[in-house]
Image (tube, rainbow, N blue to C red):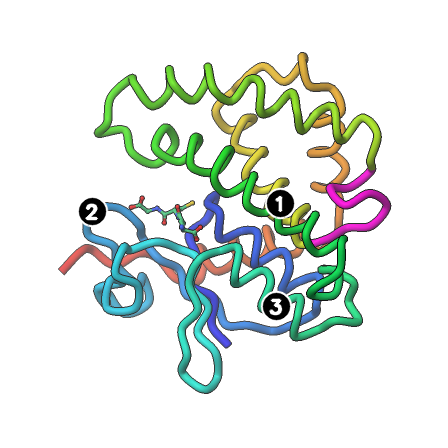
Amino acid sequence: MKLYYTPHTCSFAPHIVLRELGIEAELRRVRIGPDPIVVADGRDFRELGALGYVPLLELDDGRVLHEGVSILQYLADQHPDSGLAPAPGSAERIELNQWLTFISSELHKLFSPWLFHPEYGEAPARIARERLQPRLALVDRHLAKNAFVLGERFSIADAYLYTIAGWARVLKMDLHPYPALDAYLDRIGQRDSVRDALRREREDARAQPERAPA
Ligand SMILES: N[C@@H](CCC(=O)N[C@@H](CS)C(=O)NCC(=O)O)C(=O)O
């Protein structure tokens, strides 16, 4: 199995889940942007994913999975005993789906033009700052009452929320209005899976310097 990833991006969520599951996937670093490449061999990354987005998960049978939310669910569903996702069809699974969709459409896609597309100018930052406030407040209210997104237990939604909401810190947003979210980011950041994934991405970057674009 190969995870196509870029440091500091949403691909960190499936990487956390791989570490939670103890799966030794190969890491394939991608330089995203207008001419995305697989760093190891300089291959045009759009040969694998038309939009040039990470994450992609290449399975051992050659299938390539895209869309972070489905990759997270694929990994969890392959290992139902992990408890990383409730059983398909259950009420808890619907709750998980709601949260994954919320994180993807209401948080991730507000942050990402701001974070990854400086060519769009100031507008994405202004719009994101404004629209993120009520969304982060909603998350904060939920985390004030729940240790994890689904309550008492870590799930794939936490891997995703930690990754995306963590961008607020990268972008130096003031998190004082969201103390429960702030504490949650500290808490999840201490998990072995998160620290291990971070360490592996750093080691990979050191071991595999980027080639100049062809
Ligand atoms: N719909 C995709 C979006 C993934 C996505 O936005 N990936 C970002 C990094 S967080 C990316 O690769 N951006 C490259 C670009 O915008 O060119 C998913 O949810 O997996």
Q: Residues within 10 Å of mark 3 (few under 14, many from 20)?
A: many
Q: Which type of secondary structure does the marked residue at label 1 adopt?
A: helix
- Does residue 175 appear left or right of residue 190 in this picture? left
* Label 3 vs 1, first from the N-terminus: 3
- Does residue 188 appear left or right of residue 56 in this picture? right
> What is the span of residues highlighted in magenta in the rendered image?
147-155
Q: Which type of secondary structure does the marked residue at label 2 adopt?
A: loop
Residue flagged by tag 1: what amino acid is it?
Gln
Residue flagged by tag 2: what amino acid is it?
Pro
Residue 98 image label = 1
Residue 34 image label = 2
Rendered view: 119 above or below 160: above
Q: Residues within 10 Å of mark 2 (few under 14, many from 20)?
A: few
- Does residue 5 appear left or right of residue 84 in this picture? left
Label 1 – label 2 distance at C-alpha: 32 Å
Q: Position of residue 30 (x, y in %)?
A: 35, 57
Q: For this rendering, which residue is in front, 206 or 77?
A: 77
Q: Which picture quadrant has residue 39?
A: bottom left
Q: Residues within 10 Å of mark 1 (few under 14, many from 20)?
A: few
